[in-house]
């Protein structure tokens, strides 16, 4: 099974069914079995969503999952700046509606104390958190978590299942930041299909801690899969990265 752990449902002018059908069509071309989807319609403040916006986003995602329930696994996007509403939304989406994980973007830095109740709820529900991280030479967005923020959170909650979104963008720095955090999973999504990324991650943390993600449609499925298929690793390691590790994280 191949599982893409990082896909967005932004409509970009398409209807919900058109967007869902298009993602499945392209996933089929690359034999991707399941897509972990989050982030629904474009909103006024995507990086600082108030509750009414992230609730609307998640409802869109739930409606899209209903169109392809065998292909889509929902990740509930919340803003920890509104921790009470975020916890209620996690229960609505995961406990009541069966989503498989949590997506955190840029509401606050991921080691902010307001994130801690969300991580604790994820531990109780035994679901992974996909945390967006980046380290940009041009400067990060406001409250955009870096590899160091992520490593601090992972150290505080060693029992949490934390997916290191984009591996910090600067993957050489990112790999080093979480080498000693065994509860973290380095994700391939985003960035160009640069040689050496996957080999470095496998060498430093083991293939059991690397997962495939694309960040589609912002990036293509194919360009991000090229990082895994083009890597100088064993077939067994490739299988772990492309799907088996996510099967374990999602309790499939």
Image (cartoon, grey):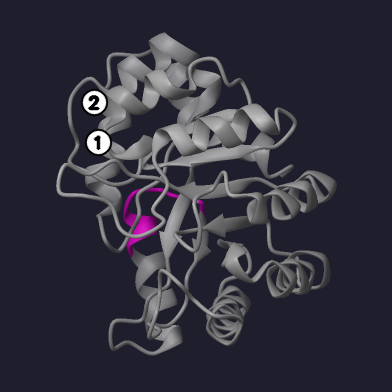
Query: Circle 1 is placed at which residue position?
Result: 226
The residue drawn where x is 47% and y is 77% is: 40
**Quadrant position of residue 154:** top right
- Residue drawn at x 74%, y 71% as measured from the top left: 84
Task: Name which quarter of the figure residue 128 lies in.
Answer: top right
- Is 229 drawn above or below residue 201 in the view shown? below
Residue 76 makes an appearance in the image: no
Q: CA distance from mark 1 to mark 2?
A: 5 Å
In this view of the protein, can residue 219 be seen by the observer? yes
* Residue 33 part of the magenta-drawn span: yes
Question: Where residue 36 sits in the image (x, y, percent)?
Answer: 53, 56
Which of 3 and 211 lies nearest the eye of the viewer? 211
Name the secondary structure under disc 1: helix
Question: 62 or 161: nearer the eye?
Answer: 161
Q: Quadrant of the N terminus?
A: top right
Above or below — where is 161 with respect to 37? Answer: above
Residue 151, magenta (yes or no): no
Mark number, residue 133: none
- The magenta segment is 26-34
Residue 197 in percent (x, y) is at 28, 24
Q: Which residue is mark 2?
A: 230
Q: Secondary structure at mark 2?
A: loop
Q: Are marks 1 and 2 in contact (CB under 8 Å)?
A: yes
Is 113 positioned to the left or the right of 28 in the image?
right
Give x and y (percent) for residue 115: 64, 53
């Amino acid at each position: 099974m191949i599982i893409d752990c990082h896909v967005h449902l932004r409509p970009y002018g398409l209807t919900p069914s058109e967007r869902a059908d298009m993602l499945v069509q392209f996933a089929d071309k690359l034999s991707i079995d399941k897509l972990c989807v989050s982030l629904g319609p474009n909103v006024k403040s995507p990086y600082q969503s108030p509750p009414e916006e992230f609730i609307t986003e998640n409802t869109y995602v739930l409606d899209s999952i209903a169109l392809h329930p065998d292909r889509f696994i929902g990740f509930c996007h919340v803003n920890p700046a509104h921790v009470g509403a975020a916890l209620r939304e996690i229960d609505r989406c995961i406990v009541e509606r069966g989503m498989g994980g949590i997506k955190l973007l840029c509401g606050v830095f991921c080691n902010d104390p307001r994130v801690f109740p969300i991580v604790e709820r994820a531990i109780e529900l035994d679901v992974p958190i996909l945390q967006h991280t980046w380290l940009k030479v041009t400067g990060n967005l406001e409250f955009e978590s870096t590899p160091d923020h992520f490593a601090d959170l992972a150290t505080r909650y060693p029992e949490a299942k934390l997916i290191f979104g984009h591996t910090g963008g600067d993957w050489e720095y990112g790999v080093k930041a979480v080498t000693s955090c065994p509860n973290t999973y380095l994700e391939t999504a985003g960035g160009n299909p640069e040689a050496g990324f996957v080999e470095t991650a496998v060498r430093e943390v083991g293939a059991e801690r690397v997962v495939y993600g694309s960040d589609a449609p912002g990036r293509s499925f194919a360009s991000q899969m090229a990082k895994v298929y083009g890597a100088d690793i064993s077939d067994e390691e490739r299988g772990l990265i492309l799907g088996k590790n996510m099967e374990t994280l999602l309790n499939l």
